[in-house]
Each structure stands twice: as structure tokens, then as C-alpha cells.
Amino acid sequence: VILLSSLVLQVVVLIIGTASHGSARWIYIGPIGFQPSEYAKTAIIIYTSARTAVESKNLCRPGCLIKVMILPVITIALIGVENLSTAIICFAILFVILFVGSPRVRHFVLIGIFGVVGSVLFIMFAGYRANRVKIWLDPENYADGYQTVQSLYAVGSGGLFGVGFGRSVQKMGFIPESHNDMIFSVVCEELGIVGAAFILIIFLILLRRMAVTAMNARDRFGSMLTVGVMAHVAVQLLINVSVVTNTIPPTGVPMPFVSYGGSSIIFILMEMGIVMSVSLSLIHIS
């Protein structure tokens, strides 16, 4: 029910969605905005974890694997029509849960190839996505590379210890989305390499704690749920930091727990609540 409702919402947003940054990603109910693609991440985690827990011994069979993947893949394809970066995150979540939960590995080579080919096709059939690759390779020679260049200025000017908390110059109108997708560049400018590294270390500690929870969960469903949330946080963090440092082509992905956000922060906190519930059950058992 959770995944089907997410699938329906992806169709609805393509029909009546409100455009933001050139893509129809939002559904508004009165003054309240809602981004169905963020709900889809949580829905895919819950659905895939449940199916993986039930079909754990049968996932080595290609037919069973395809049956588990079919609804999430359809949902991801609909997301990819307007939001490729979120679709990539959702596919990564699906891949990691199935990879961890499956007794065999060889099927996942084909799944990985399928994901890469699908991403390339989405880029090829949308001109603005292909342009992002060109911007990534040479941001200074493209008008749309302004955000990337300003982000790199902020990262570079931070030095070792930064210019001081709250004293960023680049966030004063130079970096678009400085409070959201590009907030890590402001962190680098204000706190320097040391401060940025400290934040990344906190994330690594969080991911490690989730890994420990997943390995010691009292049932397979709880373990897979924790793996899914861990994959969500890790992949989204990796993409955000990579975009800020121009390691990958520019795309809009918020930094978990740090970026300003509505739907994104609500659903990721809901996922953390699920992980805390799994972790709490370990305390009760011990």
C-alpha cells in the first residue's frame, strides 16, 4: 500500500505538479507543499525491506528478484522523468538493500549495468542534462556554471580553519541555494577543512552506528530497514559533497540533516525514527 500510494503520487505530480527549477516536483494542498519523490525514498525502503525479508531464500532466483524489483523500478522510472538525481538515489537504495539481502552476488552485475545504462539514456534524451556534463567539465566557460564556480570559491577561501562561523561572504547572494543544496560550500568557507572534516566524521559515526544496528537487529526486516536508511543517508551525502566540490556534474540534492528543507527533512527524520525503533529493540533484548 505504501509503495502503490507513492507510485500513484508520481503519476499525479507529472499531471498537476507545480514546477520548481524547471521541473514539476511539488504537489500543493492549499499553502502546504509536498514533494512525492521524497516520500518515494521512504516507501522504497519499507517495501523492498519487507519483500527482501520474506523472499530472502528465493532472491537467488532471477524470477523472484525481478518480481521484487518491478514496482520500485516503475516508481523510480517515473521519478526520473523529472528528477534524475532523486531517481539515482532511489535506485541506489533499492540496489543496496537487495545486494545485502540476497544470497548471491552475480545478478547484481546486471542490475548495476541496467542502472548505468538507464541513467545514460535519461541524460541523452534530455538536452539540459547533457549540458550539465559540459558545465561540469568546464564550469567557467558556461553561464550555468556560475553556481559551481562560486561554490568552489567558497570551498577554497575557507582554508584550514575557515573565515569564522556566520561570516561567509559567498552566501550573501553569490551562491544560489546556499541554504539548501550548496550549504556544504558555506560550511567549508566558514569552518574550513577542519570543520568540514569534523561534520563528515559525525556522518561516518552515524553510518557506523546504523551498520552495527543492522548487523545486530533481532529480525531480517529490521536489519534491511536499517540498511536502506543507511544507504539513503550515505548516497545522498556522497552526491551532495561531490556536487559542491565539482567531482560530479551539478544536480540538486540536499545534504541530510544540514540543508534547509521541508519534505526531505521530514521523511529522513521519519526514517531515522525507524532506525531508532530497531535499535531500541536491541536494548530491550539485551
Image: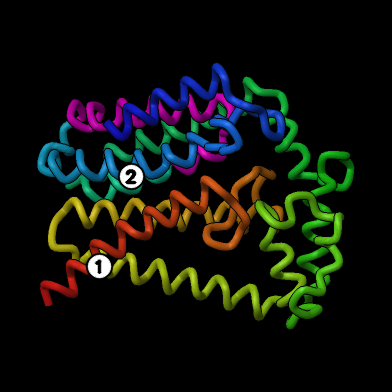
78 displayed left or right of 243:
left
Q: Residues within 10 Å of mark 1 (few under 14, many from 20)?
A: many
Q: Say what amino acid the circle numbered 2 marks.
A: Ile
Q: Disc 2 marks which residue?
A: 45
Q: Secondary structure at mark 2?
A: helix
Q: Which mark is residue 279?
A: 1
Q: Secondary structure at mark 1?
A: helix
Quarter-wise, where is residue 271 in the image?
A: bottom left
Who's the residue at 28% across and 70% down the image? 212
Return the residue nearer the eye: 219 or 156.
Answer: 219
Say if mark 2 contacts mark 1, CB within 8 Å: no
What's drawn in magenta, residue-wise? 62-91
234 displayed left or right of 64:
right
* Residue sticking out furthest to the top: 15
Who's the residue at 66% across and 23% down the image? 126
Q: Which mark is residue 120?
A: none
Who's the residue at 18% across and 67% down the image? 281
Return the residue nearer the eye: 177 or 26.
Answer: 26
Locate the N terminus and report the quarter of the image it occupies.
top left
Label whose residue precedes the other's in the sequence (2 or 1): 2
Who's the residue at 83% across and 71% down the image? 157
Query: x%, y% of residue 131?
Result: 75, 32
